[in-house]
């Protein structure tokens, strides 16, 4: 069994300095999150692009994560389920896409749907609420969209949303800490203020066997 190592502690202590280097932002974040993995509940991470998200983009995303997660599978683009389309809003129902993704693999996998098209779900009294991502809590599927992300740092923000939704699949709720990746967007885009999982969320994820928190 692999456990947390001292290099991870050092990385976390250096994170505020490293994060200033925007060129290596994704690397800095992922070193802190994925550094040394805990193997209690290690699942294969399946990146599943939809028809509007190229295989090349999905492979590029996999390369960002590959040094820190040893089981990644990149699937060929998948057609959207027709019943997910909402013509009046020109977007897809995220909950319908989740059901589609959930049927693709077994319990030892975590399937992440990738799209550039807007997605939505029902929130409270709002029947069709636009979101950046949605995931089962807990579960084995989530979907992430780049549609509502800022153009100037879309890749960085996309990675943050992906990690947020993965956190939900491990059972984490939204977090009140403004800089935590599990913060509730509340219909806005606060991703630039989010830096990492907070200490409490990291501890919960460690207990659940999520390698990114070790």
Image (cartoon, rainbow, N blue to C red):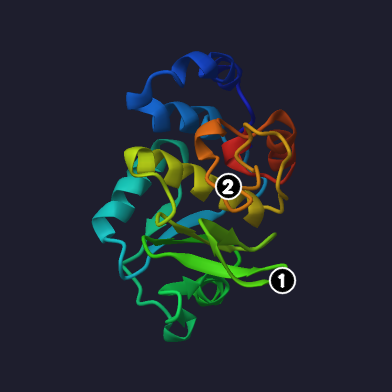
* Furthest-left residue in this view: 56
Q: Identify the residue at image location x=40%, y=57%.
A: 147
Check the picture and name the quadrant holding the C terminus.
Answer: top right
Task: For mark 1, give the secondary structure.
Answer: loop
194 or 64: which is nearer to us?
194
Which residue position holds label 2? 164
- Horizontal arrangement in the rendering, residue 78 relative to residue 4 (left or right): left
Work out how far the residue at label 1 is from the one at label 2, CA to CA, in angstroms: 24 Å
| Side of 85 where 32 appears, left or right | right
The correct choice, above or below, for 186 with respect to 126 in the image is above
Residue 26: x %, y % from top left: 41, 33
> Looking at the figure, which quarter contains the N terminus?
top right
Q: Secondary structure at mark 2?
A: helix
The answer to whether 66 is drawn above or below residue 110 in the figure is above
Q: Residue at x 61, y 18 (%)?
A: 9
> Residue 96: x and y, percent?
54, 77
Report if residue 58 is visible in the image: yes
**Residue projecting furthest to the bottom:** 83
Q: Quadrant of residue 48?
A: bottom left
Q: Earlier in the sequence, mark 1 or mark 2?
A: 1
Relative horizontal placement of residue 206, taking residue 91 as reference (left or right) = right
Q: Position of residue 46 (x, y in %)?
A: 45, 59
Name which quarter of the figure residue 20 lies in.
Answer: top left
In this view, the residue in front, 144 or 103, is 144
Label 2 Cα neighbours within 10 Å, binned few <14 / some 14-19 / many ≥20: many
Looking at the rendered structure, which numbered label has been put on residue 135?
Answer: none
The image shows residue 194, relative to residue 162, as above or below, that is above
Q: How many marks?
A: 2
Residue 106 in view, yes or no? no
Identify the residue at horizontal 64%, vertical 31% (top origin): 3
**Which label sits on residue 125?**
1
């Amino acid at each position: 069994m692999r456990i947390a190592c001292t290099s991870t502690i050092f990385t976390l202590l250096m994170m505020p300095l490293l994060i200033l280097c925007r060129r290596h932002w994704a690397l800095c974040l992922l070193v802190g999150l994925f550094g040394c993995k805990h193997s209690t509940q290690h699942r294969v991470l399946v990146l599943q692009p939809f028809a509007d998200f190229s295989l090349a983009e999905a492979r590029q995303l996999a390369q960002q994560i590959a040094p820190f997660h040893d089981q990644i599978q990149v699937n060929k683009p998948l057609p959207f389920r027709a019943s997910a389309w909402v013509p009046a809003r020109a977007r897809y129902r995220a909950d319908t896409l989740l059901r589609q993704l959930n049927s693709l693999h077994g319990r030892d996998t975590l399937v992440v749907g990738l799209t550039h098209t807007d997605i939505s779900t029902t929130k409270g009294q709002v029947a069709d609420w636009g979101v950046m991502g949605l995931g089962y809590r807990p579960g084995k599927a989530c979907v992430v969209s780049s549609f509502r992300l800022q153009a100037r740092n879309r890749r960085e923000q996309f990675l943050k949303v992906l990690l947020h939704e993965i956190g939900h699949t491990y059972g984490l709720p939204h977090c009140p800490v403004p800089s935590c990746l599990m913060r509730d967007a509340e219909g806005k885009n606060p991703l630039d203020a989010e830096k990492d999982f907070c200490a409490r969320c990291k501890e919960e994820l460690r207990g659940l066997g999520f390698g990114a928190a070790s």
